[in-house]
Image (cartoon, rainbow, N blue to C red):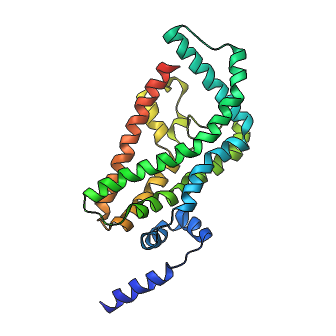
Amino acid sequence: MMETQISQISQEVSCEQPGLLKRIWWAAASPGKLMGCLAQKPRVLFGLILAAVSMDVLYISRMPLYEEFTRNTLYKTSEYMESLVGQSMTAEMVEESLPKTVIQSLITTPFAMIASLLFITLVYFAILKIMGGQGKFKAYLSVMCYSYVISALYILLVIPVSFVTGSLHLDIPLTSLAILAPEEMAGTFLYGIMKGLDVFAIWHSAVAAIGFVAVSKLKKPYVYSVVAGIFIIGLLITGVGAIVAKAFI
């Protein structure tokens, strides 16, 4: 009993003031230690900023590729509108609207990323609270914020790789099973599932699961089941999305 108390006191002391760089490193290398600290002292500012700017960093650093991606999206949207109402954008209209569309995207993306982070945190918070979990919303948000370090690592990987592949890999994640799939599978439900089976997405979910255990104080099997269930739901949505995207194109 005395040894357990000493261990708990030692852990609390070691988690009082972890620096930012240490927290970033722990997110990837020692998530259990990080999440134990965050459960005691939640921190969200860095994660919110990271989520807000990371995608824009990718877009801005590889602007020619992003402009081409946006151009192709405008053409596909135009083709879809033509199939619905018989109206489409000319090449001149696409090029004229391209700069404005790119700027609007750079402005709205940070807000969309933060909104997405808050929403998924609220989902986990509600479910784990219903299951009897402890902790406040800020603690759950801190878990998601520092889990996002894994997503940021993926973006750092994509930037140099994009110089070789000539793609931002926005549609098919670079580290997903779909990258190995034959082209004829595109647009199928299985192909969508394979897109969701991404190394960094699984890593991100694993780190989040460790954090939710630390924050909620629930048993690991319960928390891991919730995280796995939401991940599977995401896979199903991605699978349906692949079918819809093919119909859209």
Instruction: Judge from the rendering whether residue 220 lies leftward or rightward of residue 144; answer left or right.
Output: left
Q: Where residue 218 sits: x, y (%)?
A: 29, 65
Relative height, residue 140 to residue 181 (above, below): below
Residue placed furthest toward the bottom:
2
Observer-nearest of 76 and 84: 84
- Residue 174 visible within the image: no
Outermost top residue: 86
Please provide percent x and percent y for residue 140.
41, 60
Q: Residue at x 57, y 15 (%)?
A: 79
| Residue 11, above or below 196 | below
| In this view, 245 is above or below 92 | below
Q: Residue at x 49, y 11 (%)?
A: 84
Q: Residue furthest left?
A: 131
Question: x, y percentage for residue 142?
Answer: 47, 62
Q: State which quarter of the image contains the N terminus.
A: bottom left
Q: In x, y percent, where is residue 194?
A: 46, 37
Q: Left or right: where does residue 120 sit relative to residue 90? A: left
Q: Residue at x 41, y 39 (%)?
A: 235
**Image-quadrant location for residue 9:** bottom left
- State the count of labels: 0
Whether residue 81 can be seen here: yes
